[in-house]
Image (cartoon, rainbow, N blue to C red):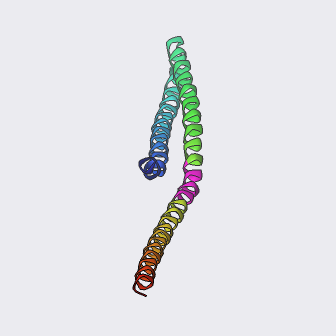
Amino acid sequence: MKKARDSYLANHQEEYEKARASYQGQKNKLEQATSRVARDAEKFRKSGTKVAQNQLKKARAAAVVFAGALGEAGRIMTTAQDKLSSARPFEKKLAARARALAAFEKDWEKKQKAAETTKTSRAKKRKTAAKKKAKT
C-alpha cells in the first residue's frame, strides 16, 4: 500500500511527461511538414507539371495525417494533465489519512500502556491488601 501511495503522483507525472513529449514531437513534425508543403507548393506551382502536382497532393496528405496525429496526441496529453491535476489533491488526501492513522496508532499505544499500567497497579494493590489481611 505504501509503495503504491508513494508512487501514485509520480506515475501520473511520468504519464503526463510522456504525453507532453509525444505531443511536442508530433507538433514539430507537423510544423516541418507544413513548411515543406509550403516550399513544395511554391516550387510545384511554378513548374506546373503533373508529377509536381502529385507530389504536392502527397505532401498535403502527409500534413493532414500529422495534424490528425497532433490532435490525438493533444487529447492524450490533456487527459494525462487532467489525471495529474486530480492526482495531486488525492495525494494530499492520502498523506492526511496516513498522518491521521499514525496519530491514532500513537494514541492507541498510549492507551494500551496506560491500561497495562493500571492492570499491574491493581494487581499489586490486591496482593498488598491480601498480605495485610493475612498478617492481621
Nearest the camera: 131 or 56?
131
Task: Provide residue 26's location: percent of width, then percent of height.
Answer: 49, 35
User: Going by the picture, which residue comes out furthest to the bottom?
Assistant: 136
Looking at the image, residue 47 lies above or below residue 67: above
Name the quarter where the C terminus is drawn: bottom left
Nearest the camera: 38 or 32?
32
Is 110 on the left-hand or right-hand side of 90? left
Looking at the image, residue 43 lies above or below residue 14: above
Q: Which residues are magenta?
A: 84-94
Residue 91 highlighted magenta (yes or no) = yes
User: Going by the picture, which residue comes out furthest to the front?
Assistant: 136
Task: Provide residue 105's location: percent of width, then percent of height.
Answer: 48, 64
Residue positioned 54% across, 49% down in the render: 84
Residue 83 highlighted magenta (yes or no) = no
Nearest the camera: 46 or 55?
55
Task: Provide residue 72's location: percent of width, then percent of height.
Answer: 58, 33
Quarter of image, res 90: bottom right
Quarter of image, res 78: top right
Nearest the camera: 118 or 15?
118
Residue positioned 49% across, 71% down in the render: 115
User: Going by the picture, which residue comes out furthest to the top?
Assistant: 50
Task: Provide residue 67's location: percent of width, then percent of height.
Answer: 57, 31
